[in-house]
Image (cartoon, rainbow, N blue to C red):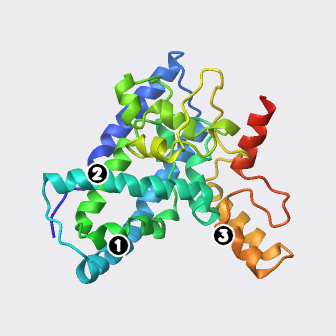
């Protein structure tokens, strides 16, 4: 088994120094906003994610090796070209994981954690799920099946996570046009964290924004529409336990208390956030359509 370093551990000092620099900028009147309670909540979610990651990564590795050792189609060597190919295939996997996490409540229940802050700064990047690591890896199962070594896959997933740290900031307005056209940037990702109807469920990119442009989910940041961060219905709490599990509680409450058919109960897991069996809820698509119609 190749012995790749744990890049996340090496990146932690960079994360800490970057956050301290951004906090300093916020004290100088720059367009960077920090509140102590919010930042501590995000850091707590990040620490919980790292702690639980020791367990979830063991499960992921076991499943990846099970597929790689017994069912792989090819044996892809570890080389510069295979890592280049994996860079794009991993990012493609991330795009669909991210997009479906906004369209399927089962995955949204863990992903909503990352969107729960009403602030947007580098500490928000640390606001990670405590539950998603145990099941969202299914979007990457095709990679060991193709023949990529599990260690390669985990390394590339770490690279993607590290890349996405720096885009959680308001301190950087725009990158050069050529960069904005190919890569995910702070501007693109601010849109993704917006609760404005026009911004909902847009820009699911990890590293490359090309997937959103290719599959019709791209939305540029508009000067006329300042981004409002958070959820369409904010939870207004800094309690890490509530942040981690509030949507799971709401999901199971809908499933077990709704007076409807078994099929409709199952649909609560599969339908988008906001869906209600009796038609009283509104999905992001409906909210966006209403907003657009109001502008006509």
Q: CA distance from mark 1 to mark 3?
A: 26 Å
Q: Residue at image x 52%, y 39%?
A: 218
Q: State the residue in front, 281 or 29.
A: 281
Q: State the residue in front, 226 or 145.
A: 145
On the image, the x and y values in percent for residue 2 come to 15, 65
Q: Quadrant of residue 89?
A: bottom left
In the shown orientation, is residue 271 left or right of residue 156?
right
Number of the label disc, if any, that sits on residue 58: 1
Label 1: few (<14), some (14–19) or many (≥20) C-alpha neighbours in 10 Å = few
Label 2: few (<14), some (14–19) or many (≥20) C-alpha neighbours in 10 Å = some
- Vertical order, 68 against 97 (above or below): below
- Quadrant in the picture for the N terminus: bottom left
Q: State the residue in front, 79 or 296.
A: 296
- Quadrant in the picture for the C terminus: top right
Residue that numbered label 3 is attached to: 269
On the image, the x and y values in percent for residue 13 come to 31, 41
Q: Residue at image x 22%, y 50%?
A: 84
In the shown orientation, is residue 82 left or right of residue 71?
left
Q: Residue at image x 55%, y 58%?
A: 100
In the shown orientation, is residue 252 left or right of residue 294?
left
């Amino acid at each position: 088994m190749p012995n790749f370093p744990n890049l996340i551990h090496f990146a932690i000092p960079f994360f800490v120094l970057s956050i301290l620099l951004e906090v300093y900028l916020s004290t100088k009147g720059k367009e960077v906003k920090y509140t102590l309670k919010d930042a501590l909540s995000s850091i707590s979610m990040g620490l919980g994610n790292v702690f639980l990651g020791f367990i979830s990564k063991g499960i992921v590795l076991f499943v990846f090796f099970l597929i790689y050792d017994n069912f792989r189609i090819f044996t892809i060597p570890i080389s510069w070209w295979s890592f280049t190919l994996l860079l794009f295939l991993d990012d493609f996997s991330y795009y669909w994981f991210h997009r479906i996490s906004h369209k399927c409540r089962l995955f949204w229940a863990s992903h909503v954690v990352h969107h729960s802050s009403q602030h947007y700064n580098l500490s928000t990047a640390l606001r990670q799920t405590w539950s998603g690591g145990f099941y969202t890896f299914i979007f990457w199962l095709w990679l060991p099946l193709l023949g990529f070594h599990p260690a390669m896959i985990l390394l590339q997933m770490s690279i993607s996570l590290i890349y996405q740290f720096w885009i959680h900031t308001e301190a950087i307005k725009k990158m050069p046009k050529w960069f904005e056209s190919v890569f995910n940037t702070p501007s693109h990702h601010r849109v993704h964290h917006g609760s404005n109807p026009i911004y909902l469920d847009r820009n699911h990119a990890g590293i490359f924004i090309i997937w959103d442009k290719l599959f019709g989910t791209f939305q540029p940041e508009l000067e006329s529409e300042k981004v409002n961060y958070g959820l369409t219905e904010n939870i207004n709490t800094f309690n890490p336990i509530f942040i981690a599990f509030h949507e799971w509680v709401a999901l199971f409450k809908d499933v077990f208390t709704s007076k409807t058919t078994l099929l409709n109960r199952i649909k609560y897991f599969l339908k988008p956030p906001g869906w209600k069996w009796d038609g009283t809820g509104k999905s992001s698509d409906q909210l966006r359509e209403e907003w657009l119609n109001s502008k006509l």
